[in-house]
Amino acid sequence: MTPTSRFQAWLSPSLIVGSSVLLAAILLVVAFKNIQRERAFMEQTLLSQARILVRSLEAGTRTGMMGHMRWGRGQLQVLMEQMVQQPHVFFLRLQTPSGAVKASAGPELNLPDLPVPAASGATEVTRLVRLDGAHVFVYARPYAPWTRPGREPCPMDGCATPIPETQGRRGPVGLGRSGLGTDRDAWVVVGLDAGPYQSALRQDLRQNALILAVLFIVGAAGLVSLFWAHHYRLARRSLKDMEILTETILSRMPVGLVVLDQDGTAQRINDSARQLLGQERLSGSLKDAPDLGPLVTSALRDKVHMEEELRLGDRDSPERYVFASVSPLDRAGTSPALYLLLLSDTTRLRRLEKKLHRSEHLASLGRLAAGVAHEIRNPLSSIKGFATILAGKAAGDPSAQKISTAFQHEVDRLNRVVTELLEFARPPDLQWKRTSVGQLLEHTVRLVEKDAEDAGVSIQIHIDPPDLEMEADGDRLAQVLLNLYLNAIQAMEGGGTLRISVCREGESAVVSIQDTGPGIPKDVLGRIFDPYFTTKPRGVGLGLAIVHRVVEAHQGEVTVHSEPGSGTRFVLRLPLRPTDSADSLEPANESAIRSVAGLEHKTHRRTGETP
């Protein structure tokens, strides 16, 4: 796991928790503000009702005293009891600042200590208390029936002169005789029933709590959903990237991959497997394939891993070897439903092994041939010397002269064979020089034009590009080309066409030499590069072996394609710059051409011989 992915894995839960806490805090603040607002509205409503009630009491008292109705404690008590009869009024009292009750209506309750307005400097006092299990809103203010808001005390409505001090302090006669004192000596306390408001407040609180919980759950679920959706998109993107990466690896890997079901039918195939097996073979069950069938059938039947190196196709098709491996795709606790077939192309490895074995065989044969040739050459010199002496002594005998001449001719031919054998056995000592491929081909073609004309063979040559150059030993390549030209001309006994072409493919020069002869039989095609193998009565069988040896020394390869009745085509693939060639090379076309010209006489002498 990368640091970024670890950070994201840690960050996501933290963000969810933090966001949820923040959301809860916001909802709590909103709910608290709402409750505070409702509580303030409730208190303001109760305060307004209490003020109205107190003003009504003061107005009733003032009206009773102004009408000279002998207003006293009894009338005030009656008025207070009538006011308490209202459903929302709990109690009503008149008391002194010291707490002594002068008049009371409603249940007798022990009120909590209230600050005296005169002592506290306040004009009114409110409390929300709980009395005998009931919620009561208590309101207290100085009792002033002769004072109206914004006016001085006045004994009757409309008077313009203030009340004398004695009257203002003692009040009207009725009030003074009632024993309540003046309006400045008493204050009124009202208790209103706050139960309905508290019930409504509690209901609002429950509703707010429910709404808060719902909003929190919805908000938290939304946040979690957002994070889940984000991680889902990331997971989908990662999965898509992984699928693309896997698909790219499977399509680009050089190993063939086939996923098989239990019937041996291909469920998934990459490009390498499609190139190796072909679409026709993959269209059906691989159990029925003649090459892969036994391996696939055994692996699927036994549900085990099996591997084997196989040759694809039949004996008539080009060689194609693969290393096949079949493995069950196990899943825990279940029988494998799919199998994996891996195919590795080992054709090139097989060719390299054959090439190595051939090189080892040729090396052993070369060492043997060199020893035998050395032992043969010494007696040949003696035999040729004796033949020369015999010819001199038998100067007058034509028959002896003929035998001596034939003797010398056969010795020369045998010596030439020994020379070729030694040349084949000797490791090629190449002289690397920059050589124009086009000029080399044109000159070697000129050397065999006479032989081709005598055999009724036309020559077609194509060079592209004309200025193609490569680093090579021009003399040895000329020997290779002349050998192939002469073999092609000799194969077309009734005439035909010799097509010679050269082109560039990457960093290689590809030379093609094709005839229209009868072709080479398949049982012979695999042995034509073996030394001393020939199908011609007068051939030695070293020509194509030397061709193969020289081409290999140039780090190239020679291949042959032939079908009976369709002619033969030799292809030389030579690197333009071999790895062990000299770094600084001088043009040597003229040197190569002069060297080839030196072979002209020998070539014409060998016309009709099979290399």
Image (tube, rainbow, N blue to C red):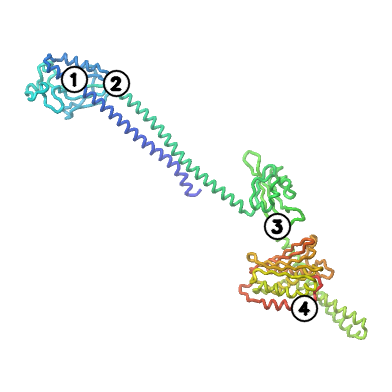
Q: Earlier in the sequence, mark 1 or mark 4?
A: 1
What kind of element bears circle 1?
helix
Q: Earlier in the sequence, mark 4 or mark 3?
A: 3
Which mark is on residue 57? 1
Tell me, yes or no, if residue 470 can be seen here.
no
Considering the image in quadrants, where does the C terminus appear?
bottom right
At which x and y percent is residue 595? 71, 77
The amino acid beneath tag 2 is Ala
Cβ–Cβ below 8 Å for labels 3 and 2? no
The 10 Å Cα crowd at callout 4, few under 14, some 14 to 19, many 20 or more, is: few
Q: Which residue is mark 2?
A: 134
Q: Is residue 412 left or right of residue 3?
A: right
How many angstroms separate mark 3 from mark 2 (CA)? 103 Å
Q: Which residue is mark 3?
A: 347
How many angstroms separate mark 3 from mark 1 (CA)? 120 Å
The 10 Å Cα crowd at callout 1, few under 14, some 14 to 19, many 20 or more, is: many
Q: Is residue 297 left or right of residue 411?
A: left
Which mark is on residue 601? 4
The amino acid beneath tag 3 is Thr
At which x and y percent is residue 101? 18, 19
The amino acid beneath tag 1 is Leu
Tell me, yes or no, if residue 240 can be seen here.
yes
The amino acid beneath tag 4 is His
